[in-house]
Amino acid sequence: MSKIRIFLVDDHAVVRDGLQMLLNAQKDMIVIGEAAEGNEALLKIPQTNPDVVIMDLSMPNGRDGLPTTSEIIQNYPHIKVLILSMHDDQQSLFRALKAGASGFLLKSSLGQELIDAIRQVYSGQAYLHPTAQKKVIEHVFHDSGEEYDDSFDLLSEREKEIFSLVAKGYTNKEIGELLNISPRTVETHKAKTMEKLNLSTRRDLVQFALKRGLLDN
């Protein structure tokens, strides 16, 4: 029987060690790689080709889980990503789902639930922690009217940097000089960013930036 190949992404080595011991003890699972943050994960995942990635949502010392998940799904759609989070809030849940995660699980409920969740997402199903399921149901049937447009969080760090500078009025040439890239490269990043955020004009861009508080500093 082939085993489920699992890749771990968490900024705490003790967490990765604990997960590795738990998962390798299962007859149908094997941990084939690990990383302390998103950029390291994106370098190693093509080499290890996992079936399931266990992704920490928040990694302050490197690339976070959301943009990493989005890039993994975009480049390797066959890989399933299961998000682990310390926070049981609706915003984190919807951000994870929008990034393309197949599951959402709280770190406080690891153990058998994690094992079950891995098997479920590997089989092609989605997995949500019970409280997360409730939040999805409440959102569908009792829409609060709030917008969860978190597309900005899915941009790369360079795209975010260029977006903020454009919103503040810098020209392509000025941005290129600041970031040591060509104006043409700036324009390419800007065009891709506008497309990802579904923005058509510079006015739309500035309004988006104001709404996100990107012009406050």
Image (cartoon, rainbow, N blue to C red):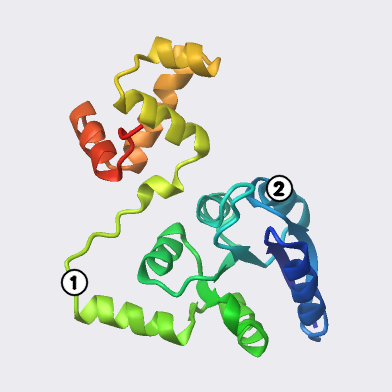
Q: Residue at x 30, y 54 (%)?
A: 149
Q: Residue at x 59, y 62 (%)?
A: 78
Q: Identify which residue, 33 or 12, lies in the foreground.
A: 12
Q: Identify which residue, 121 or 112, lies in the foreground.
A: 112
Q: Position of residue 182 (x, y in %)?
A: 50, 13
Q: Name the amino acid type tagged 1.
A: Ser
Q: Name the amino acid type tagged 2.
A: Glu
Q: Residue at x 50, y 65 (%)?
A: 101
Q: Identify which residue, 18 or 48, lies in the foreground.
A: 18
Horizontal side of residue 8 vs 100, given as left or right: right
Q: Residues within 10 Å of mark 1 (few under 14, many from 20)?
A: few
Q: Residues within 10 Å of mark 2 (few under 14, many from 20)?
A: some
- Mark 1 or mark 2: whose residue is earlier in sequence: 2
Mark 1 element type: loop
Choose top left, top right, bottom left or bottom right for residue 55.
bottom right
Q: Residue at x 62, y 86 (%)?
A: 116
Mark 1 lies on residue:
144
Q: Position of residue 186 (x, y in %)?
A: 44, 20
Mark 2 element type: helix
Residue 149 seen by the camera: yes
> What's the CA distance linking mark 1 and mark 2?
38 Å
Tag of residue 40? 2
From the image, which quarter does the C terminus lie in? top left
Q: Identify which residue, 41 or 5, lies in the foreground.
A: 41
Quick check: 182 above or below 12? above
Residue sitting farthest toward the bottom: 112
Residue 2 seen by the camera: no
